[in-house]
Amino acid sequence: MRKITVGLLIFLTGLGFGWYTRSYWGIQPIQTAQSAIPAPSKPVSAGEPAVDRTPSLRARVDDIGGLLERGDFGAVLERYAVAAFPGY
């Protein structure tokens, strides 16, 4: 019986402490996230064509697929390194 009484007192103490902290911390306003600010973009002029100077991803995949079919694994690794790490 003594263990039940001690357990009940500990539970009620925790319950009261939780209620007190919830009431105390609930007074301040909740902080919200700042709204997104759109970044300025560079306008595209009508006289300047939008040309992609890099080969398309589909062309790279087809090229690597052809090399894999021929079994030229050294060339595949070189093409992968160029595609994955363009600065090297």
Image (spheres, rainbow, N blue to C red):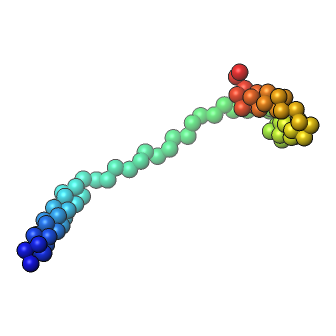
Question: Would residue 75 appear left or right of 17 to someone viewing this image?
Answer: right
- Tell which residue pokes out farthest to the right in this image: 70
- Quadrant where the image shows the C terminus: top right
Occupied quadrant, residue 17:
bottom left
Can residue 27 be seen? Answer: no
Q: Residue at x 86, y 38 (%)?
A: 68
Work out whether residue 58 or residue 75 is closer to the camera in this orientation and state it.
75
Q: Residue at x 70, y 28 (%)?
A: 85
- Tell which residue pokes out farthest to the left in this image: 2
Q: Residue at x 7, y 74 (%)?
A: 2
Q: Is residue 56 above or below residue 8?
A: above
- Quadrant where the image shows the N terminus: bottom left
Work out whether residue 20 or residue 47 is closer to the camera in this orientation and state it.
20
Question: Would residue 79 appear left or right of 33 to someone viewing this image?
Answer: right
Q: Position of residue 20 (x, y in %)?
A: 16, 61
- Tell which residue pokes out farthest to the top in this image: 88
Occupied quadrant, residue 81:
top right
Q: Is residue 32 above or below residue 83?
A: below
Q: Position of residue 46 (x, y in %)?
A: 79, 32
Work out whether residue 10 or residue 54 is closer to the camera in this orientation and state it.
10
Question: Would residue 11 appear left or right of 74 to someone viewing this image?
Answer: left
Question: Would residue 10 appear left or right of 58 to someone viewing this image?
Answer: left
Q: Position of residue 27 (x, y in %)?
A: 22, 56
Q: Residue at x 22, y 60 (%)?
A: 22
Q: Is residue 11 above or below residue 76?
A: below
How many dots with numbers?
0
Work out whether residue 76 or residue 26 is closer to the camera in this orientation and state it.
76
Occupied quadrant, residue 55:
top right
Q: Position of residue 28 (x, y in %)?
A: 24, 53
Can residue 17 be seen? Answer: yes
